[in-house]
Amino acid sequence: MTKSRRLLFLLLLAGLSASCSSAPAILVRGDAKSADVAYRGDLAAATAIARRHCARYQRVPRLLGADIGTAYFNCVRP
């Protein structure tokens, strides 16, 4: 394999591995009163997602609780 082909292969491999990693937190369910956020290890990432979701309703998130992988928020008026 030539150096240019090897470099191309490594770049493609790096791109594939980067695209396979999932987001640190995603909104699973939500409405004007609540937000359920799936997360991996970083509760701050889940809080940021809940903040963005609740802001759509002019509200702020209040953490109700969390279990392994899911954080539960109420969206309350500031």
Image (cartoon, rainbow, N blue to C red):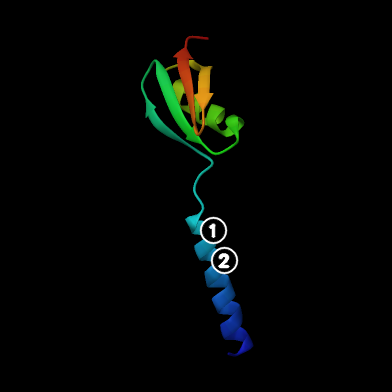
Farthest top residue in view: 77
Q: Which residue lies furthest to the bottom in this view?
A: 2
* Image-quadrant location for residue 32: top left
Residue beneath disc 2: 14
Q: So how many labels did they put on this image?
A: 2
Residue type highlighted by circle 2: Ala
Number of residues whose C-alpha sits closer than 10 Å to that of mark 1, classed few (under 14), some (14–19) or many (20 or more):
few
Residue 53 image point, x, y percent: 45, 26
11 with respect to 32 (left or right): right
State the quadrant of the N terminus: bottom right
Residue 76 screen position, x and y as percent = 47, 11
CA gap, disc 2 and disc 1? 6 Å
Q: Do the residues labelled 2 and 1 touch (CB within 8 Å)?
A: yes
Binning the other alpha carbons within 10 Å of mark 2 as few (below 14), some (14 to 19) or many (20 upward) gives few
Residue at image location 57% in from the left, 71% down from the top: 11
Q: Which amino acid type is marked by label 1?
A: Ala
User: 74 above or below 38?
Assistant: above
- Circle 2 — which element? helix
Res. 15 in view: yes
Identify the residue at image location x=57%, y=66%. Answer: 14
At horizontal 55% and vertical 77% (from top left) the residue drawn is 9
Q: Position of residue 3 (x, y in %)?
A: 63, 86
Callout 1 secondary element: helix
Q: Residue at x 60, y 90 (%)?
A: 2
Residue at numbered disc 1: 18
Q: For residue 56, say whether it is visible.
A: no
Which disc number belongs to residue 34?
none
Q: Nearer the viewer, residue 49 or 63?
A: 63
